[in-house]
């Protein structure tokens, strides 16, 4: 393909914990071949997922757009929209001039555990979750803000506004720090029913409403790039911003999982299982789950694991540094289901769903002198699958027997893990053929909001997905392994 073969309509940005991706999409939401670039993230390990520098990440986004505009195989003179998919739950404080007062606190931040414990002691968590869709947990803003006030009062006092990274970026690029319903819904401070900041928590926690970003309307804003960025990227000077959508919601949309009948199971650095549908939040949210929003009309209900592909890569690099991917895959395939006698508690980055423990730590139990490194890696993959099984059981209350659609680079590159997931769940798993679901999902939502396409529920695949069937015998073995892991988990958190 040569340059200018296809006309770009949307610049899509996907900002994740593992890197930044930029791509061009046409007016029907199809990614233009040869018109995407990816820049490796600033995180070098699991510890870096909890804290990172906003300016460094901002520079990474700028670098990625620079590269795309140089390398693109698309005509970009007519770009109308800029869509953004961004990781949920981050928190940045800024001062009255808009300068960051602190690093980004990400979803893997665990230092606010005592603040979350204080919230659980002082509030009815079930009642609060019914309004906000969120448990009290270090991932969310209430615990993070309380922790900052107690442990770094100077920073908290210098902070005049609280933002997530998506608003920090759009403030820099467009001069607007409005927050989308989608991003706001993952803070733990949004009333999911009214789509406004939750006055009960704001008043009780003494968080001024004016310290939070204005909630943006759905659809393209009137904001275009600030002068310095319009001069840097003249091809984008007339493109309008669509408020950022959270990566989890975008992933569902891009994978074509937009009804209660389809459940997206994603493993990237972390992991999640989610259903997205038009309608109202659940009247009763299972305690294992959260409820967020994609926009004012669509709800996302699911559970998230803090450890997924990131833990896999950590163990692989630590235990099997000299083996190539093909050799590792063959070795993993040669092992029997739960044949190693190990139980892995996959909480290196703490726990979110399904138990929301404030103290959970990772562990490998059952090792002997004969335990092989490849067995530890397989046990970790199975251990993560067991946590997904508990989330999917809870989601059956919302979307009974939904079809499982697998997404995310970790599953798309690992037939072994796909088979493990199918065997653990006891259900067929369809592998999405959309490799970049989050950036595509954000682009589709932007096109719908701009009136370019009638609905996001357009055909999202070519019908040639791989379907993995489960093995009943292995499924039976895994049910006993899940029970064993649950007993060990309960023993570990008995003091909470």
Image (spheres, helix red, strand yellow):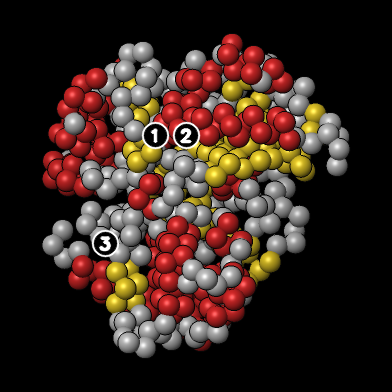
Q: Position of residue 360 (x, y in %)?
A: 25, 60
The tag earlier along the polypeptide, 3 or 1, is: 1
Nearest to the observer: residue 165 or residue 133: 165
The residue that appears at 43% across and 62% down in the rendered structure is 314
Quadrant including the C terminus: bottom left
The residue that appears at 39% across and 53% down in the rendered structure is 46
Res. 479 image quadrant: bottom left
Q: Position of residue 398 (x, y in %)?
A: 45, 55
Q: Are marks 3 and 1 in contact (CB under 8 Å)?
A: no
Residue of label 2: 57
Q: Are marks 1 and 2 in contact (CB under 8 Å)?
A: yes
Res. 382 image quadrant: bottom left
Crowding at label 3, few (<14), some or many (≥20) Cα neighbours within 10 Å? some
For marks 2 and 3, give the CA distance.
Answer: 28 Å
Q: Position of residue 305 (x, y in %)?
A: 40, 56
For marks 3 and 1, give the CA distance.
Answer: 26 Å
């Amino acid at each position: 393909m040569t340059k200018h073969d296809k006309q770009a309509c949307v610049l899509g940005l996907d900002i994740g914990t593992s890197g930044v991706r930029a791509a061009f999409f046409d007016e029907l939401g199809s990614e233009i071949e040869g018109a995407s670039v990816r820049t490796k993230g600033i995180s070098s390990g699991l510890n870096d997922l909890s804290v990172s520098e906003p300016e460094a990440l901002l520079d990474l986004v700028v670098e990625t757009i620079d590269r795309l505009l140089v390398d693109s195989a698309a005509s970009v003179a007519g770009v109308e929209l800029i869509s953004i998919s961004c990781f949920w739950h981050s928190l940045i404080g800024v001062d009255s001039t808009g300068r960051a007062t602190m690093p980004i606190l990400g979803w893997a931040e665990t230092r606010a555990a005592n603040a979350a414990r204080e919230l659980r002691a002082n509030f009815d968590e079930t009642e609060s979750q019914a309004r906000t869709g969120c448990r009290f947990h270090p991932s969310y803003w209430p615990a993070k803000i309380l922790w900052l006030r107690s442990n770094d009062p100077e920073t908290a006092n210098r902070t005049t506004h609280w933002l997530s990274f998506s608003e920090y970026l759009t403030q820099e690029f467009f001069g607007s720090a409005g927050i989308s319903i989608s991003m706001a819904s993952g803070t733990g401070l949004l009333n999911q029913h009214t789509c406004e900041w939750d006055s009960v928590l704001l008043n009780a926690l003494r968080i001024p409403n004016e310290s939070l970003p204005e909630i943006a309307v759905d659809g393209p804003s009137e904001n275009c790039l600030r002068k310095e960025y319009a001069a840097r990227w003249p091809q984008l000077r007339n493109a309008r911003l669509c408020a950022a959508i959270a990566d989890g919601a975008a992933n569902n949309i891009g994978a074509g999982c937009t009804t209660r009948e389809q459940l997206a199971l994603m493993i990237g650095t972390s992991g999640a299982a989610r259903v997205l549908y038009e309608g109202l939040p659940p009247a009763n949210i299972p305690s294992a789950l959260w409820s967020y929003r994609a926009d004012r009309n669509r709800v996302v209900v699911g559970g998230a694991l803090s450890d997924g592909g990131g833990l896999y890569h950590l163990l692989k690099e630590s235990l099997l540094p000299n083996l190539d991917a093909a050799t590792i895959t063959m070795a993993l395939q040669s092992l029997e289901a739960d044949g190693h006698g190990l139980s892995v508690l996959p909480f290196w980055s703490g726990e979110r769903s399904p138990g929301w423990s404030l103290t959970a730590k990772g562990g490998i139990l059952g090792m002997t002198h004969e335990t092989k490194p490849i067995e530890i890696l397989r046990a970790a993959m199975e251990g993560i699958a067991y946590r997904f099984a508990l989330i999917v059981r809870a989601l059956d209350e919302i979307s009974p027997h939904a079809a499982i659609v697998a997404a995310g680079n970790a599953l798309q590159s690992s037939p072994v893990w796909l088979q493990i997931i199918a065997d653990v769940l006891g259900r067929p798993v369809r592998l999405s053929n959309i490799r970049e679901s989050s950036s595509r999902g954000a682009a589709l939502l932007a096109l719908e909001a701009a009136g370019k396409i009638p609905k996001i529920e357009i055909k999202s695949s070519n019908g040639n997905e791989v379907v993995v069937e489960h093995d009943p015998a292995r499924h039976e073995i895994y049910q006993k392994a899940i029970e064993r892991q649950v007993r060990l988990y309960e023993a570990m958190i008995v003091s909470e």
